[in-house]
Amino acid sequence: MSSEIQKLLQEFEEWIVFCESVFHIDEETWNQSLALGKWSIKSIVSHMMLWDRYFYEEAIHKIALGEPLTLVNKPFEPFNRAAAEYAETVAADDLLRDAISYRKKIIQDLRSLSEEQANQTYIDGEGNPFDITEYLKDFIGHDKHHMNQLKQFLQERAAGN
């Protein structure tokens, strides 16, 4: 596997480290909105976990198995609303365990690929190209955005207490 993909996978693992670091958060903090009209920590973790689950099941695991991808472009708003609703139905610890589990599954499957498989362009369920390097870059940016939001919120909350 290319050194670029190895480096990206290391960055992709930062979400796992973050999730492991927030197991101690109390229920009130978990459920508090980051700001007026914003999601809670729990909703953001749910959002991240469900996107990971979707990409794992419809793209990454299919690649590892040598099967056609079933990934399609999902409308973001309904998917994200469903993630926020799902957060209300699950315990925080279970949600964190699932978030860590799906991220680990993605990383494990990607690390199992040969150099050729990792650098191949795949075709998704709509006939569009799917590139592992681009996928990782996109989601690392997404991860960093949400982790920065959450870290800032937690720091401000800790300073205010």
Image (tube, rainbow, N blue to C red):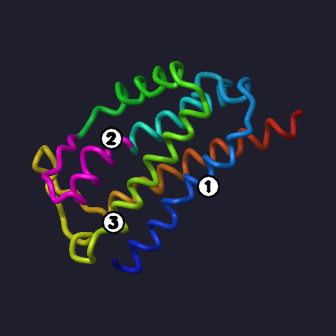
> Observer-nearest residue: 73 or 71?
71
For residue 4, what is the image quadrant?
A: bottom left
Q: Which amino acid does label 1 sit on?
A: Val
Q: Which of marks 2 and 3 is nearer the N terminus?
A: 2
Alpha carbon of mark 2 to alpha carbon of mark 3: how far?
A: 17 Å
Q: In whole angstroms, how far apart are the C-alphas of marks 1 and 3?
A: 21 Å
Residue marked by disc 1: 17
- Residue marked by disc 3: 133
Q: Is mark 1 on a helix, strand or loop?
A: helix
Question: Where are the magenta residues, as a range?
Answer: 53-72
Q: Classify the position of the C terminus by image quarter.
A: top right
Q: Identify the element where label 2 is drawn.
A: helix
Of the two numbered discs 2 and 3 in the rendering, the one whose residue sits closer to the viewer: 2
Please name whichever residue, 105 or 59, is drawn nearer the observer in this view of the structure: 105
- The amino acid at mark 3 is Thr
Identity of the residue drawn at 48% across and 60% down? 12
Callouts 1 and 3 close, C-beta under 8 Å: no
In this view, the mark in front (1 or 3): 1
For label 2, the residue is 54
Q: What residue type is labelled 2?
A: Tyr
